Each structure stands twice: as C-alpha cells, then as structure tokens.
Image (cartoon, rainbow, N blue to C red):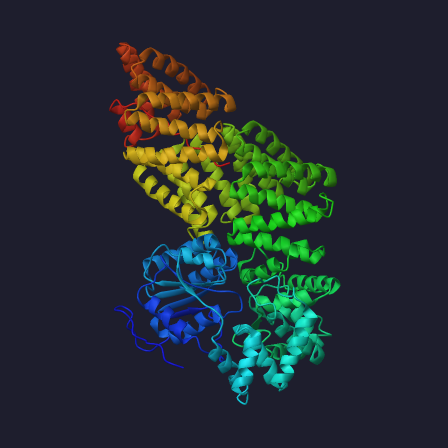
Amino acid sequence: MPSIINELPAGRQHASRLPAVVGNLPLRNADFTGRSELLDRLHQRLRTGTTAVLPSAVHGPGGIGKSQLVTEYVYRHQSDFDLIWWVPAEQPTQIRTALTDLAARLALPVPMTANTAVPAALEALRIGRPYANWLLIFDNAENPAEVERFFPRGGPGSIVVTSRNPNWSEMASALPIQVFDRNESVELMRRRDPGLASDDADRLATVLGDLPLAIEAAAAWRAETKMAPDDYLTLLDESRSELGEDSAREELDYPPQVAAVWNISLQGLGRRDPSALRLLQLCAFLAPEPISKQLISKLDPLVFNSDRRDRAIRTIGKLALVRLDHRSGSFQMHRLVQRVLISQMDPATREAMRHGAHLILAGNDPDQPDDPDYWPRYAELYPHLVASQAESCRDDLVRAMIMNEVRYLWRWGEHEEARELARRAYRAWLEWGDESEPGTLRMAYWLGFLHFVIGDYPVAATLNARTLELYRSAEGEDAAETLNAMGAVASDRRVAGDFAGALVLSQTVYERADRAFGADDPFTLNAAHNLAVSMRLSGLFGRALQLDERTYQSKVQIFGNDHPDSLLTAGGINLDRRELGDYVKAHADQEDVVVATRRVLGYDDHPDLLRVNRELARFRRKAGLRREALDLSSDVLRRYRDRYGDQHPETVLAQLTVSIDQRETGDWNAARESGEAALRSLVERYGDGHPHTAGARSDLAVTLRLLGDHQRARDLNEQAVRSLSERLGESHALVLAARINLASDRFGLGEFDEAFALDEENYRQCGKFLGQRHPTTLACGVNLAMDLRGLGRDGEASTLFEATMNAFRTTLGEEHPVTAAAGAGIRVNCDVDPLSL
C-alpha cells in the first residue's frame, strides 16, 4: 500500500507525537484495505487549509466505508493535529453530548450543561485557545441544516463530515466515495483467506457488488466456516431466492442481493448460537451507536450470564456482524445489518424483540435525572431510546424511563429535545385513550412546562388549562398535583398580562396548600413565593414584602440562609423594597444575594444566577451606579444569548435592560437600537398589549425624546399609557411611570399646559399610592416644577423644586445622578423595568 505524503504547511510542522487531546475516536480497523487515492485526496484538502467555513464532506451510500476511511485517515495523521474530536452527528443531542464532553476535556470554566458547554467549546475552537490546530469529525451527519449550526464560526482548525446525504456537496468540499475497485475487494478477501484464488475472489466480488461492508461480511463468514467459494456462491443464490426481490427496498442505494450476505451469516449464527442471534435481534432496535456490555447486562441472567454474553459478542464480532471496541467494552452494529435483521423477523418476533430492547433500556435507568453524576448514563440511553421508539411502549418501567429522560434533558439544558420527547410520548400515550391516566397527566404537566420554558406560551396555556381540568376531576381540588397545575395556569395568566387573574389563582394555591400541608411545608412556601410574585406584578408591593419576609424566615429555619430557595425569596424581598422606593438599601442587599447565590451555585451561567444578576443590574442603575449596571447587564445579555439564543424571553428582557442602561450612560443611539429590537421581540413573544410590551414602548420613547424625536416619543408613550391603564388600572406604579414620561414628551413639544395638567394629576396619584418620598413621586415633583416655570409661575415652581430636591438628597443622596441632574434643571425620566413573571 503506497504511503501518504506527510508534508504540512507552515504552522502544522510537528514532530512525530500524539495529539494533546483525542476524544471518541473509533477503534482502528486492522483489516482496512485500499482507498489510497481517497486518503491522499482527503489529506491534500486538509493540508491546504480546508477549514470550518468549508468542511470536507465524505459522502456515499451506506456500507461504503465512509467512517472507516476517515478513521484510518485520523490514525495515520494523528501527529498533524493538536486536538482531534469525533462527534456522532445523527441526532443533535449526540452532537451536544460530544461537544459538552469536549468542553470538559478542555477544562473550560462553564457548567457541563448543553446550553452552556456547547457554546463555550465552539468559542474555544473559534479563537484557537487552548488549541488552534484542531480537527472535528462529524460522523453520520445526515441533515446539513441541523449539523452545520454546530460548526465553529471560523477558526484555525478543520472539519470533516461523513454522510449518506449528497446535499453536503452544496456547502462543503465534497469527496464522494464509491464501492471498492475490484483489486481492493480481492485484497480484502484474500487477507482473510490467503489461499483464495484470485479468480474465485473476483467471482465473489462480482456477486457482492464490491460493497465494502458486504465484502467484509462474506470474507469473515468464509474465514470462520472454511466454506469453499463455490459452496458460498450457491448459498448466496439460495439466500437471494429466499429473500425475494424486495429484500433491500428499505435501502434503495444498496444492490438488492446484498441483504443475502447477512442472511447467510445470520442464519448460520442462529444454528451455532441462538442466544447470540437473540442478542443481535434485540440490538437491531437500538441505535447504530456503541452498545456497552453494561447496557445489555440487564438481559435475562438465566440466558445471558456474563460468560455467555461475552462469548456471544465475540462470535458476532468474528462474523463481522458488529464491530468490537475492546477499549470501551462496547460493540456497534451497522444500520444495514439492523434493517436486514428486522426485515427477517415475523411480526410477533419483531414486537417481542422491540419490547425486549425497551426493557433493557428501562433496566439501565438510574432513576436520578436531576443528579449530574448520572447524566452520562442518560446520554448513553437517549439515542437508543429514540431508535427503538420507546415512547410507544406501555410498560410502566419504560414510561418512567421516558419521564426521567425528559427531566434529564431539561436539567442538562437540552430544552427543545426535552419538549420533543415529551410531545412524542404524550401523543403516543393519548392514543391509548385515557388522558386522565396518572402517567399521561404527569407527562402533560411536563410538556406544558417545557412549552413555557421555551417560550411557546399559547400552546402551554392551552395544555395547562386542560391538565388542570383533568387533575381537578381525577385528584380533587386540594391534591398537590392539582395545585401544581393551578400554579402553571397562574404563570400562563402572568405571561398573558392578566396579573389580576394570576393573583387570584396564586392566592387560591397558597391558601389550599396552607390548609392541606401546613404553613411551613416546602410546598406551601413555594406557593407563598409565587403569590408574592403575583402581588408584585399587581403593584401590591407592601403586601408582597410582608409575605416574602415571613416566607424567608421559614425557609431559613428549614433550609438555611444559603439554600437556593432561601436566596430566591431574599431576592424577592429586595425587589419589594426597591419598588417601595428604598433603592440604596435594596441594592446593597441584592449585592449580598448575588454573592451568596454564586457561592452556592458555583458558576456564572446558572439560570438562577443569570436571573439575579439581571436584576442586580437594575438595582445598580436605581442606586446610581450606571456604568456598573451596564457592564453587568451586557455580560448577562451575552450569557443569555449563548445559552438560549436571541429570541428566548429571558434574552429579550435582558436586551431591554441593556437598552435602558445604554440610555442612562449616554449612548442614546445604541439604546435606541437595543430598545427597538427588544420591543419587536416582546410584541412577537407576549403580544401588543402586554404590560411588558407597553413598558418597553415607554422606555424606547424616552430614548427617542432624548434624540430629539419628540413626536414619535409622545405617540409611543400614549400607546403605552393606554395599554398599561387598560391592563393594570390607573393607580399602578408602571402606569404612573409611563404617564410621567408622557408629560415630558408634551413638555418637549412645547405643550406646557397639557404637560402641567398631566404632571399635576401624576403628582397627586404618586403621593397617594407610592408615598410622598418615593423616588417616582420626587421625579414627578421636579418635572411639575419645570412645568410651572414653563407657564411663568416661578414662585410656585421654586417652592416645589426646593422641597423636592431636599427630599431627593435625603432619599438618594447628594451624589446620585438623578439628584445631580434634577438639580441642574434636567427633567427626570422614569425607567419602566418589567418585573419577572
């Protein structure tokens, strides 16, 4: 076999050595034969700079040897790279698992969850740190659109894709691979049987169509049985007749006679070792991915003790029906062998074997989906669960496994895949006819929750309402499941902007939990926290503070003050105090909450820490630390984008926070751009009349007014005031803030009488509902004094201005930016920060 040129361009000259990092690389095929020209061509492409922007795509029909070719290339050229990572790419979840493992191997300072580790790994590859000279192999990448989004966006490394899909040629440097040439077929068969005559090898290769996988299987069978070539050809003809003309119709890119090769091997295996054939039949319903010995250890021990299992695996390996990997103690079956096996089963056997595969998987469920220590096991199970269609199984253990996989995927950060699995399972279970069956109802609750997490709010609301109705009927009004479902509906109401309706439901859940479980039960305390959220959204800040303080004391007694649940409510207390106007104290306490939350959770990308940091940015701004607020809110926005993407609800709200911080630090053009983007997303996500959308309109209007666009600012603020008043009532704090901003728009347009009339009413309402020393009341007082001056009423203006400024100095401090700006005669703007739903 000719050698491959090992010259490399500048920057890739290395002494002979192994890469610093290698992961998931399949075992090398000791019988690899031929393909010299293809190996040369692949090497030339990679050595001349084929990068992540234009990957090399090795494509061809199944059984052609694509993965084997790339595996051989990697082993021959390991010393050319600093990092080589093999990525199983048939399903997005497998890709995320492989890239998460890469992030761990690189010791990246992020949590090992899919939506944090994957972006971090791709970024490390893009910037080339710690390794610039890397090679990624995406194996069995059938869907270009799904796989391409996991490519590093640029970077100094290289990508190779293997696929049966020729469409990769539209976006990659394609390297088509075909069947063996005849010399390669003959060489492989004679390697297994040195005494085989060239003419006999040629006849066998002709019948087998030179398909590498078929050549290997036939050679392995003959080597094991010592069967003469003529006898094998006769057996092959008989096998083809037995299978008929349609045996390969499932795979149109295979010659019809190819299935006959495996038919011979499988029938022979059944005669020699029926238990080994049964093992293969079970594994035919699993994914064409590595299957560990541990996974199949749950087979009937009377039939498959460890010795018999190992003997069966060795036998099927010798017959080339699976590929063994002794390093990992696993084996892998080609998808074509699986399909041939399944096609040969009668319907009863097929269903029995599929069910057996389901039970094997369920037997491997550690029943710990919330514990990261068990996530690798759930990752191993998942592709097999999908391939076997386990969600269609009625067995209770299998259904429990499906539920645990949904929870694992959610915890691991694979929210879309968690929802898809929950949706498939729920639909399958509904077909059995009883939507009120406990397992089906539980899956319905989780599916509604995942729709909510992803931001598909209308679908979540419809499903959650139906789930609550069914739980009420099946379990009664006071059951924990019913109250959980009612809490989900309350969340739906908050998202819909129906804060009053959410408050009623949250109050009901809390009162029933208190009555059924007691005031200090964790379930009741969680209900109390959610009730305080609804109170806050409804503008009942004093009542929310009283409830949060009681809840916090109980949580500290049960969990301690450093428990995530305790810290969650501590943050709620700070929100209550901030909304009541105590900006300075609330900010100081929130800094402490964030420090404690980071210490408890351990990493900056945890969703709970992102949430409290987003709030902390707002606390800082209210306390006058505008630059520090922008630095933090920008960091939070970046992390949300990395974790969830641009359109996730949390990302959108983080962008709105950044836009306000940009405005307050004087970057008005950037504030307008961010504010307009956030407003568009909020309209799409929550609807045109939602309080969050209206608040974003008022925030954008302030920026536009500062940029001189007074007319558009007034139009936006009028729309905001109208929407907020209709949803929340005239006395809500958000309504008052938007009305204060609207008065400033009118003042900027020279409409002094209209501005004065509005500010006068605003000042009275703020004093009544927020208190005379609340910063919002004081902001209105400063603006009202300016209205009076605009009308020539200087005496009244001076009296009000001096009184208000004294209150500002006492409340916010002499150095606060709002105090300074008001003292300089600048109208005060009100931020309309949306509270968490």
Left or right relative to 646: residue 214: right
Give the answer, above or below, for where 476 lies relative to 702.
Answer: below
Q: Position of residue 617 (x, y in %)?
A: 38, 40
Q: Position of residue 174 (x, y in %)?
A: 40, 62
Q: Residue furthest bottom?
A: 195
Give the answer, above or below, for where 5 lies relative to 649.
Answer: below
Seen at 44% across and 27% down, the residue is: 694
Q: Is residue 615 at least partly visible in the picture? A: no
Give the answer, above or below, for where 642 lies relative to 767.
Answer: below
Front one among 270 and 749: 270
- In the rendered view of the protein, which quadrant contains the N terminus? bottom left
Count of number-bearing discs: 0
Seen at 53% across and 66% down, the residue is: 62
Say which quarter of the image contains residue 252: bottom right
Seen at 70% across and 39% down, the residue is: 470
Left or right relative to 271: residue 143: left
Q: Position of residue 70 (x, y in %)?
A: 44, 70
Front one among 794 and 101: 101
Left or right relative to 453: residue 261: right
Left or right relative to 794: residue 19: right
Say which quarter of the image contains residue 657: top left
Q: Position of residue 264 (x, y in %)?
A: 65, 76
Q: Is residue 198 at least partly visible in the picture? A: yes
